[in-house]
Amino acid sequence: MSIYLDKNSKVIVQGITGGEGSYHTGRMLAYGTQIVGGVTPGKGGQKSEHGLPVFNTVREAVEATGATHTCIFVPPPFAGDALFEAYEAGISFAVCITEGVPVHDVMSVVGATPGMQIIGPNCPGLISPGRASIGIMPGHIFKQGNVGLISRSGTLTYEVVDGLTRAGLGQSTCVGIGGDPIIGTTFVDCLRAFANDEETKAIVVCGEIGGSDEEDAAAFIAEHLRGTPIVAFIGGRNAPPGKSLGHAGAIISGNFGTPESKIAAFKQAGVPIAERPSDIPALLKKSIESLNS
Amino acid sequence: MSIYLDKNSKVIVQGITGGEGSYHTGRMLAYGTQIVGGVTPGKGGQKSEHGLPVFNTVREAVEATGATHTCIFVPPPFAGDALFEAYEAGISFAVCITEGVPVHDVMSVVGATPGMQIIGPNCPGLISPGRASIGIMPGHIFKQGNVGLISRSGTLTYEVVDGLTRAGLGQSTCVGIGGDPIIGTTFVDCLRAFANDEETKAIVVCGEIGGSDEEDAAAFIAEHLRGTPIVAFIGGRNAPPGKSLGHAGAIISGNFGTPESKIAAFKQAGVPIAERPSDIPALLKKSIESLNS
Amino acid sequence: MNLMEYQGKELFRRSGIPIPRSQHCTTPEAVGDFLAANPGEWVLKAQVLMGGRGKAGKIKFATGREQGIALAREIMATPMPPNRQNPKGEAINSLLVEEKLSIAKEAYCAITVDRATKRPVAMVSKYGGMEIEEVAHEHPESIAKFFIDTAIGYSPFIGRELAFASDLDPGYRKQLPAILASLYHLFFEYGAKLVEINPLALTTDGRVIASDAKVELDDDALFKHKKFAEWHAVLPLDEDEQLATEAGLGIRNFRRFGGTVGTMANGAGLAMATMDAVKFAGGEIANFLDVGGGANAERVRNCYELVVNHTPAKVFFINIFGGITRGDEVAKGIVEALRTTTSRKVPLVIRLTGTNEEQGRKILADAGMTPVETMDEGAAQAVRIAAGA
Amino acid sequence: MNLMEYQGKELFRRSGIPIPRSQHCTTPEAVGDFLAANPGEWVLKAQVLMGGRGKAGKIKFATGREQGIALAREIMATPMPPNRQNPKGEAINSLLVEEKLSIAKEAYCAITVDRATKRPVAMVSKYGGMEIEEVAHEHPESIAKFFIDTAIGYSPFIGRELAFASDLDPGYRKQLPAILASLYHLFFEYGAKLVEINPLALTTDGRVIASDAKVELDDDALFKHKKFAEWHAVLPLDEDEQLATEAGLGIRNFRRFGGTVGTMANGAGLAMATMDAVKFAGGEIANFLDVGGGANAERVRNCYELVVNHTPAKVFFINIFGGITRGDEVAKGIVEALRTTTSRKVPLVIRLTGTNEEQGRKILADAGMTPVETMDEGAAQAVRIAAGA
């Protein structure tokens, strides 16, 4: 099994008749994802350009199609509303691609939608290679296999996946969790899911500077995933200290946030650090071999 | 077992140094309730007049005493805050005695405190006779036994209990759910708890005109409690139609709210209706006999 | 507290809900002056809490000063006709002079408190301008409802769902989510138990506008807004409410029914049951009276005087079951109240039990009063006294 | 967007947080006029975004017109001294003239966004008036935190808990819950990422008052409040931010580092990794540049010109991995950008893969450009070119 998404997951697209929504719906369909319809208020009863039914509301869409997953392509001011609509209609898994959603909107949604797994916002989505994709990831670079991948970045993920695939390391599920300050699903959430997934035999964590998600991930790994081959990469190691979130933010994360802190945390958890994305496949193979021997 | 409360339940009192709070704390202690402390901001470290420790916050009280239950005696503008404080401190069962709490405060609390059972507000509390009491019920009229009692009223409850006790019908737990438009625990919530309680062999439902809680209770009984002896009383049958909650309220409840509607609902569920509180014991005995034969 | 239309619309305006241009006038002359200064046809609407203004001829169209004064006088000359709940009708003390809308469609929308789900419920129907009970009876399927999760609050999708689910005219769709947002804001911010727009008009030029306003505020939340105290002063209480307030009771703690058995109990539930018991014993109830908690001498005396001075009661049945209220305190209150009252004396029947009943009974006995044992017994005795007196 | 103290205090005032009496002045003369009209001792505080004003001598006490003008001139004469993050310092364009408080105690309180819990966190410490990082280092146990459930929002018990848990002076206790309520309202209503009061002063006459104000607003939420556009205009951007904005990029999409290898990638993560790759290959980075999605000709040209005109880049390494960004569009953009730019020409190294990469590579090839295969290869080639050129 992959995590979060497989070929039987029924997916709707919120904003299906918009430019990006329509384009990526076509790509997701082409990849094999079970897109069962879409939502655009006022266009209910029409067909999308892919021949899918369009509904006025998520509730109507869910009632008509039995969808459990949604992919959200709506402008930033409406993303929070779209997530609430999905939640109230009974959707259990929502991917929010939209970039630039106000951080308070995200906090409000995440805090009031218990039981709905939200990926993003400001993320490329996720893919269970060979089965289904929700979001905007370029499917052709992925290959089905046993490596779970989690990344805060979009395009960097593709870079890493491309390397894995070329090295013959297929993937179980790849999740782009998004780069915003508040996101629905963190590294730890994904690691927990991978820990319970039989298909996933190894994991790649693509972190970057800022925040403390990587430190939290390292702590989780140290406690729950000692026997699993894992490699981490930290992007932005040569970025000088930027404008921070301010004093108060710095306290919360204590001395977290620097590449040094993240690297130290992973090393302490026994997780090798790749210097470059292109180093990941070899490191992962080495880790798999050493843990299997 | 009683429902919600037994002699091992650890209870704190919010507002323990106030007039009512202090008085009823003494009575609850006298009844045998495990009151383990109280909260009055600014009086932390002192002792209450009963010799109980007083804390500045519910969190401190819970950490120090392991309390799981609270009894709230604070003025109406602060009741919502007191309930939120209890919830965040990990309290799982809260009785709010306060009358006159704004209905929006109650809705906000009830909607955002999943997992905490709230009794009231504007209620006399509950009692598991012979074991413990939280609230302001006069303990000496109760007697331990197998009748569960639920009531929207305060003093009417005592009237009914007094009759039961005099007739030799002891009680498992008696809950005064409160008379406000929005309450934390409804008839149906209590009936569900009684349905799972081995000690409770019969139930008395003391309803009154207005709202649709009695109709909901009747529907629940028809589905889940057909084999349990139950008697209902509807207060205010001779009250002429008062000033209603307004048009919109009337729709929601459809034709609910009148005594006729409530009586019809209970009759349909096979529940006998007592004409007077004093008729309840005899009716209940008859029902127990007929179901046992 | 129910608000008048003009007060409700003032809250609508502050909350950003579109309302017609209007002027609130307390005299026919003010109406005339306004119409003189503002040419065209205007609507004069009586400001009352009772429904059925249209049928009662209390809404009229007027143009110009003279017609305005004449029609305003006509409307204000007589009160609203009585109905079962308002047996004296309702005096008309002011008018709302309002822009005459060119209406294409009428819809209904409201937010209120739902007991069963413990949530606010937003409701929309495409049948506006008629009593919503009638709509609920004739087209129950037409009323779309959404039970709002207070942890989320209102979000625009709720308005969209309701617009589609109620099959509203498409002319409403773009504006409804924002109007409901404002209505929810009002509902929440001002602690309302009901906010209702009926009809919500779609004008021929495409505006969506609140043609009427019905707002019921939560009395328990009035302390949060000073403005409301001022409004409270101008809202007419009915006579029973007025008397209750003067006696220091809650507005809904007293109501008269014309019979000869006066009653008083502590707690609304017991007070209702006391009435039921009197009725069951064959008596006619003079009144409902919930004395509430803390029945001290002054409170008891006020209640006693309220009943003997304002009802034909021939007996006063006091039914107290002590919980918060302590029997000894009530007993002291009763003794002291009877000692100090200057009103006419009627026989008392007292039933006193519960918290501190022993002490209470002793106090009564010391004052020469013999309490009865049960509510039924008290009711029967009170009915006998009323019949025999 | 970080606000200046006077702007933050304006939001404090609107939200009901007590602030000292004050006047914002943009010239020494205005300061003088104010002091002339308002006798007594006042504080002149430079309005800048950088910290460390006190140490830099940019806060002074003044009485009367002449001293006010003289000290204001002195403060404004030189910019704030540079530090690592602000290598050019910061010019002082205005002053806040403020009531001199008689301070008994100083505390700290703030609300910000916590990534790990996905919640707002409220923080209080009894150590106010010093950098909070310093407090966190020296007295970490002194900082009391509460992670706020957004479904509940702020409720006064949070302020009480924090006051007790942080062992605040009792003089703060009564007022802190209301101040935190207002602070949370501000935080939520204006979409702030940080609201901080440091110090929160307890005056000798028992007032609790925000002596300083630090507010960071969420750039993504600025659209909700028109007022902020106006403030945005007066807030100084640093040069890189200014250039990024002029190029039509997000304020944080461009930063210069002085090296000779210019870079551009799509996505912040890839752009950072691209820099890392250049560094790994032994080169010196000219800049960080995230072109974002939708890299059309105009966007690519702007980015190219931004780098070649404002950095010493000797080569421009374009690293695109297509997701939303489609390879063919980027390729068209690159070709068109290079055809139309009037800026100096530097060699390009292009890496293009992902969505529509075949079409994109063909477009580049048709224009005589040969893309490299991998990021490492591109970085190495770019470094070679920069070294050899």
Image: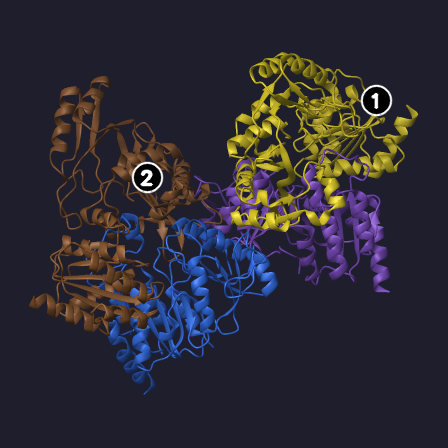
Chain colours: A blue, B purple, C yellow, D brown
Residue B234 vs D315, above or below: the answer is above
Q: How crowded is mark 2: few (under 14 residues within 10 Å), some or many (20 or more)?
A: few
Same chain, labels 2 and 1:
no
Mark count? 2
Pick the residue in front: C372 or D90: D90
User: Foreground mark, 2 or 1?
Assistant: 2
Q: Which residue is drawn at 59% across and 27% down?
A: C7
* Mark 2 lies on residue: D229
Q: Where residue C45 sits: x, y (%)?
A: 66, 24
Evaluate if marks 2 and 1 touch, with contact meaning CB atoms under 8 Å apart: no
Q: Which residue is drawn at 34% across and 71% down?
A: A222
Q: How far apart are marks 2 and 1 (CA)?
A: 71 Å
Q: Where residue B6 sits: x, y (%)?
A: 62, 56
Per the image, label 2 sits on a secondary structure element best described as helix
Q: Which quadrant of the rendered structure holds the C terminus of chain C? A: top right
Quarter of the image where one finds residue A169? bottom left
Relative to D27, D105 lies left or right: right
* Mark 1 lies on residue: C312
Q: Residue at x 12, y 25 (%)?
A: D70
Relative to B194, C225 lies left or right: left
Q: Where residue D132 sits: x, y (%)?
A: 26, 47
Pick the residue in front: A166 or D107: A166
Q: Which quadrant of the rendered structure holds the N terminus of chain C? A: top right
Residue type at mark 1 is Pro
Relative to C215, A33 lies left or right: left
Residue D181: mark in rendering: none
Query: Can see residue C373?
Result: no
Residue type at mark 2 is Ala
Quarter of the image where one finds residue C281? top right
Per the image, label 1 sits on a secondary structure element best described as loop
Relative to D8, B274 lies left or right: right
